[in-house]
Amino acid sequence: MISEKNEDAYSIMIDKYQPLISKYAEQYYQKYDNRGIEKEELIQEGILGLINAINTYKIQDNCIFYTFASLVIKREMERYLKKNMRNKQLILTTATSFTESIGIEDLVLEDTLYNISDNVETAIYDNYYEMLLYNFKYELSPLQSQVYELRLNNFSNKEISILLDINYKSVDNSIRLVKDKFKIYMQRYV
């Protein structure tokens, strides 16, 4: 039916191979996340690859159609990715929005550009230390990080012990260790 260019046969094949196309599109989308690649575009390229596979497949090549189609679908998606990841489009695919968070809670690039008071150096200095404080939690163990976050949010040691379901002494020891690590951490950057 396909060799006779039957539209229904093409539709059946596309429906049958849609899960495979979606799987490959998801894999490539995850791999190239935040680089301007759209999953729907990958799916469209996969469908084009499947149609190309349908039109060029020859039974006498002793190859299972599934294997052949899988290869052609992947190649089509990879060609699309290669075309869209060229350096001439790098600025578009790696640009950061003025309204996108820059790693510090609720701070966006726009804040550092337009809401600066009289002294630019002071604003940069404040943002630098704010970012150091934010990144410090990654230097801590999971428990210490939780205690640190809660302490920064003005929870008492007793409240922290209740929230984390640990004894008061563990909270107290964690805070002491966090203070010691903080001194060492700040000596590296100041």
Image (spheres, helix red, strand yellow):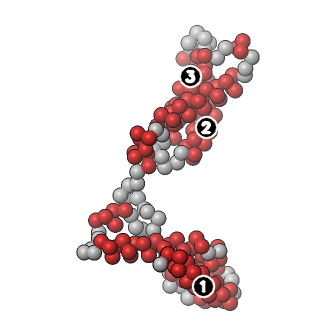
> Could you tell me the amino acid type at mark 1?
Asp
Q: Quick one: label 3 or label 1, which is nearer the N terminus?
A: 3
Residue at the spot of label 2: 24
The 10 Å Cα crowd at callout 2, few under 14, some 14 to 19, many 20 or more, is: some
Mark-to-mark CA distance, 2 and 3: 16 Å
Callout 2–callout 3 Cβ contact below 8 Å: no
For the N terminus, which image quadrant?
top right
Q: Quick one: label 2 or label 3, which is nearer the N terminus?
A: 2
Mark-to-mark CA distance, 3 and 1: 63 Å
The 10 Å Cα crowd at callout 1, few under 14, some 14 to 19, many 20 or more, is: few
> Could you tell me the amino acid type at mark 2?
Tyr
Residue at the spot of label 1: 180
- Compared with 28, 79 (above or below) is above
Q: Is residue 92 visible?
A: yes
- x%, y% of residue 129? 44, 75
Q: Quick one: label 1 or label 2, which is nearer the N terminus?
A: 2
The 10 Å Cα crowd at callout 3, few under 14, some 14 to 19, many 20 or more, is: some
Residue at the spot of label 3: 51
